Image (tube, rainbow, N blue to C red):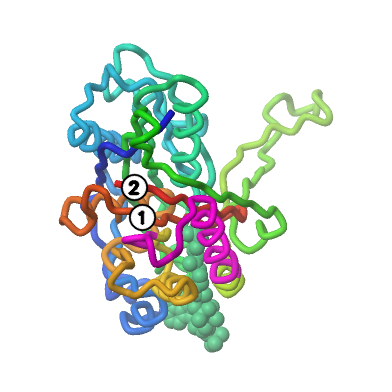
Amino acid sequence: KGCKLVGCGSAVPNLMISNDDLAKIVETSDEWISVRTGICNRRVLSGEDGLTGLAVEAAKKALNMAEVDPDDVDLILMCSSTPDDLFGSATQIQRALGCKRNPLAYDITAACSGFVLGLVSAACHIRGGGFQNVLVIGADALSRYVDWTDRGTCILFGDAAGAVLVQACDGSEDGLFSFDLHSDGEGQKYLNALVKDDETEHVLGSNGSVAGFPPRRSSYSHIQMNGKEVFRFTVRCVPQSIESALEKAGLMASDVDWLLLHQANQRIIDAVATRLGVPPERVLSNLANYGNTSAASIPLALDEAIRSGKVLSGHTIAVAGFGAGLTWGSAIVRW
Ligand code: ACO
């Protein structure tokens, strides 16, 4: 059984923060940020209908393009590390889309690799589980966990949502050729936002009646990152992963029309493309406008490239996500 991409959509918040805006709150400059990262602007959620609202907007556009009714969606995968609800947002997206047949909806937490893992999960559900129309959404609002006084990280991230509809099809039309997925918990120390258990005042009785049971109020600490180590890991592991996915598909780097990497940093994108021998004109990049939008970055860039007529029907795209966990993975897909 095959599966193919039949629709895409994206949504970004209205509030735009430029490098010059950031230079007013931390000691940095437009030149430093753009030279080191390629980022000029980013969007930040403020007053919109939460991340769920952005995800719903992106999903509606994908369904529209695919000409698929919300009632015909049988699975929604919300790939996000920053959902509006700790327990996940997929069911709220299902509700807002008005999918009356109540598709299965659940969240996938895998940081910037989330969307690639969502694509793989969609393919598995279609091939092994008989699902027909799977909505894969990548959405994140890392602005919620950024330390806006840390110039090493606050310059990098932005908020967005992107979505694709993956549909069951005949094996001869298959558009998801191969995958290559990895994770390495040893690298968690290089990029994380860990839970903080703040022990609060004992509210269960002033006489200390419930020993050993301190009530806690938990939250997450800001994003902590060792930029140099993340950079090194990416440039080492991502080209290997793409080569492995290409090999599984029986393709070479020269066979793909486009290279679409998670939009973390232009220097990472350039380094990976150079290692693979893919020329700049075949590399998709839009991070100048949006920064690193985590799980949203790949479907956001894909949607822009499709709607602007760069990516055409029948084009082959090598996609790779990488980030916290550490996690990384590649997929070779056809639009
Ligand atoms: N403006 C001005 N100076 C800065 C800034 C800033 N925004 N940030 C750091 N600096 C300073 C540092 O303080 C340091 O100064 P010092 O030499 O006086 O100590 C100097 O610039 C160099 O700092 P480094 O951290 O070594 O800078 P580096 O060249 O490594 O660039 C960067 C930092 C851009 C973060 C880079 O390491 C990088 O891009 N790494 C990859 C990170 C990434 O992409 N993470 C996300 C991927 S995973 C995911 O998407 C969740």
Indicate the quadrant where residue 301 lies: bottom left
Residue drawn at x 36%, y 35% as measured from the top left: 172
Is-magenta flag for residue 236? yes
Q: Which residues are magenta?
A: 233-260
Q: Tell me whether circle 2 and circle 1 mark residues in contact (CB < 8 Å).
A: yes
Depth check, front residue: 173 or 235? 173
Q: Amino acid at mark 2?
A: Arg
Residue 220, image x and y in percent? 57, 47
The yes-or-no answer for disc 1 within 8 Å of ligand 1 is no
Residue matched to label 2: 334
Q: Classify 43 as above or below 51.
A: below
The yes-or-no answer for disc 2 within 8 Å of ligand 1 is no
Going by the picture, which residue comes out furthest to the right?
Answer: 211
Residue matched to label 1: 317
Q: Amino acid at mark 1?
A: Ile
Is-magenta flag for residue 68? no
* Mark identifier at residue 78: none
Left or right: 95 with respect to 192?
left
Going by the picture, which residue comes out furthest to the top?
Answer: 101
Q: What is the distance, in whole Å, between disc 2 and disc 1 at their CAs? A: 6 Å
Residue 234, image x and y in percent? 55, 66
Residue drawn at x 34%, y 23% as measured from the top left: 94
Q: Secondary structure at mark 2?
A: strand
Q: Main secondary structure of the magenta part?
A: helix
Q: Quadrant of the N terminus?
A: top left
Q: Residues within 10 Å of mark 1 (few under 14, many from 20)?
A: many
Left or right: 22 with respect to 127?
left
Q: Secondary structure at mark 1?
A: strand
Badge 2 or badge 1: first in the primary sequence: 1
Q: Classify 68 as above or below 178.
A: above
